[in-house]
Image (cartoon, rainbow, N blue to C red):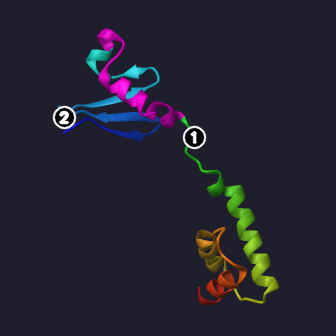
Amino acid sequence: MADQYAIKDKTVICQSESGSTYIITRAGCSCTGYAYRRICRHYKEAEYRGLIEQAERPRTLLLRSPMIIASRKKAIVDYLTKNKIPFTNKKVDKLESVLNINMTPEEFSQLAKST
Ligand SMILES: [Zn+2]
């Protein structure tokens, strides 16, 4: 079994084939090899796969930011009100979570009425 890599809390976690777990960041790897040589296969592999850069990047998706979600909910409320479709806050939350860019107004209305 080869080394396994995962990203957690802005670090790359390497589960090595020998059963050890190492933590890799831009600053280095927690293995003893890295401590001696300032380089190791875990670090090289994590860097090669772009995992170090990926771990450093903020993971909040813009489309799921509170501001965008609030805007989408307001748009949904306006739409439902204009089209005289009854709604509750819970229904608006549900519709917001499923609304996508490929939906037609008819599909959305139908979904709103059946939710
Ligand atoms: Zn290492």
Which residue is painted at 58% across and 48% down in the image? 60
Look at the numbered discs 1 and 2 and tell me whether their residues touch, using CB distance below 8 Å.
Answer: no
Residue 93, placed above or below residue 83: above
Location of mark 2 (residue): 19
- Numbered label attached to residue 58: 1
* Amino acid type of the residue tagged 2 in the rendering: Gly
> Left or right: where does residue 92 sit relative to residue 28?
right
Which residue is painted at 19% across and 34% down in the image? 19
- Which comes before the other along the chain, label 1 or label 2? 2
At which x and y percent is residue 7? 41, 40
At which x and y percent is residue 34? 32, 16
**Residue 27 image-quadrant placement:** top left
Q: Secondary structure at mark 2?
A: loop
Q: Assign the magenta stretch its main secondary structure.
A: helix
Residue range in magenta is: 35-56
Q: Is residue 93 magenta?
A: no
- Which quadrant of the frame does ligand 1 lie within? top left
Q: Quadrant of the N terminus?
A: top left
| Front-most of residues 115 and 42 | 42
* Amino acid type of the residue tagged 1 in the rendering: Pro
